[in-house]
Image (tube, rainbow, N blue to C red):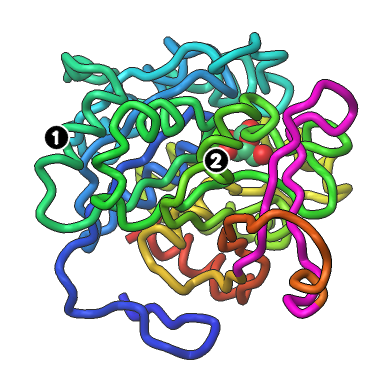
């Protein structure tokens, strides 16, 4: 598969396989994201770790295992992570978008997993994989950041073993769950602040501003359905989610937030990102969970008082058609 970046650069190289851990709360778009990585022969998918989020933890874990079974990738271990945020209770699941079981009520179309969950929990397994790695590992969190905050807090000595953390989350101009906040950040703002503001590990944040621009349409979904058994099964998971986005977007489109972030995790450069100082609002009130990026010009920022804040790479641009083509090719082989 030839892959060309928005700048016309070939993204398929002769480099060794890219080691990756996906931390996830499936969720329909999570299911697509897991499949995208699991089916890519250039990705060494080391583990899928689960977290509460779109639906409660037992359901996200079951869904992750079923998606790997669909992709005939039960060799990939699934480890169970946090069932609630670091400090405050999770305000609400996202069943309104992903359906009662997280997969539009259709998780039964996926095969029953045959492999049990890993004997160790998500944070411990991530630490073991990092410690054993001879090449830095990319982590792609596409749910609440609770597991990642715990990992960075408990095992600071392992952060040099992390290549990048490519996070689906945040919104530069408002949110999708509240007026200010995007779902993953809003679910556990304290964890998000730990990962994005307090730590020094390289991060790419893929906010809703960009994922919304990469929405797929009915023709894209038809091609997926007609591509073969895996595409047909993924397509079968979409009715509730698609209906939610029909209302949210005002037309028949569907937003694959997490797959857009995983595309960047497995193919660095497919999204264009810019470093900005970033903070996460943790106060209670209408802005809780907002991601506040300082997008003023550097000259202006430097001339005004403020702390020396860490910069986070924020993905704000791509070629949406090329990205959609990349996703379709990756999911249909
Ligand atoms: C994010 O929230 C969840 O509902 C999706 O799975 C995605 O990770 C989008 O805001
Ligand atoms: Ca998700």
Q: Position of residue 270 (x, y in %)?
A: 49, 72
Looking at the rendered image, the quarter that the C terminus falls into is bottom left
Please report the residue visible at 76 percent of the width from the left and 60 percent of the height from the top: 294
Seen in the image, is 228 located left or right of residue 196?
Answer: left
CA neighbours of label 2 inside 10 A, class few (<14), some (14 to 19), many (20+): many
Q: In the rendered image, which quarter is residue 332 located in?
A: bottom left
207 is within the stretch colored magenta: no
Q: Position of residue 166 (x, y in %)?
A: 46, 52
Number of the label disc, if any, that sits on residue 253: none
Ligand 2 occupies quarter: top right
Q: Position of residue 151 (x, y in %)?
A: 35, 30
Please report the residue visible at 36 percent of the width from the left and 79 percent of the height from the top: 11
Seen in the image, is 298 located left or right of residue 239?
Answer: right
Seen in the image, is 78 located left or right of residue 202?
Answer: left
Seen in the image, is 310 located left or right of residue 20?
Answer: right
Q: Which residue is mark 1?
A: 75
């Amino acid at each position: 598969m030839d892959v060309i970046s928005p700048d016309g650069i070939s993204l398929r190289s002769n480099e060794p396989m890219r080691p990756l851990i996906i931390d996830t709360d499936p969720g329909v778009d999570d299911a697509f994201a897991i499949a995208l990585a699991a089916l890519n022969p250039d990705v060494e998918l080391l583990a899928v770790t689960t977290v509460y989020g779109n639906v409660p933890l037992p359901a996200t874990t079951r869904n992750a295992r079923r998606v790997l079974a669909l992709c005939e990738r039960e060799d990939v271990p699934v480890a169970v992570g946090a069932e609630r945020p670091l400090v405050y209770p999770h305000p609400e699941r996202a069943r309104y978008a992903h359906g009662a079981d997280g997969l539009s009520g259709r998780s039964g179309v996926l095969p029953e997993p045959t492999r049990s969950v890993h004997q160790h929990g998500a944070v411990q397994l991530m630490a073991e994989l990092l410690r054993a790695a001879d090449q830095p590992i990319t982590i792609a969190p596409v749910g609440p950041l609770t597991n990642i905050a715990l990992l960075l807090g408990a095992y600071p000595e392992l952060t040099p073993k992390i290549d990048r953390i490519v996070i689906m989350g945040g919104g530069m101009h408002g949110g999708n769950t509240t007026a200010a906040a995007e779902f993953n950040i809003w679910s556990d703002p304290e964890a998000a602040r730990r990962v994005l503001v307090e730590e020094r590990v390289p991060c790419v944040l893929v906010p809703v501003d960009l994922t919304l621009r990469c929405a797929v349409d009915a023709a894209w979904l038809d091609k997926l359905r007609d591509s073969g058994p895996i595409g047909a099964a993924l397509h079968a998971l979409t009715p509730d989610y698609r209906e939610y986005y029909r209302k949210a977007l005002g037309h028949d489109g569907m937003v694959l937030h997490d797959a857009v972030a995983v595309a960047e995790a497995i193919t660095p450069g497919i999204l264009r990102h810019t470093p900005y100082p970033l903070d996460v609002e943790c106060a209670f009130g209408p802005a809780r969970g907002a991601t506040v990026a300082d997008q003023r010009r550097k000259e202006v920022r430097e001339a005004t008082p403020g702390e020396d804040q860490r910069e986070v790479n924020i993905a704000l641009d791509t070629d949406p058609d090329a990205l959609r083509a990349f996703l379709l090719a990756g999911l249909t082989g």
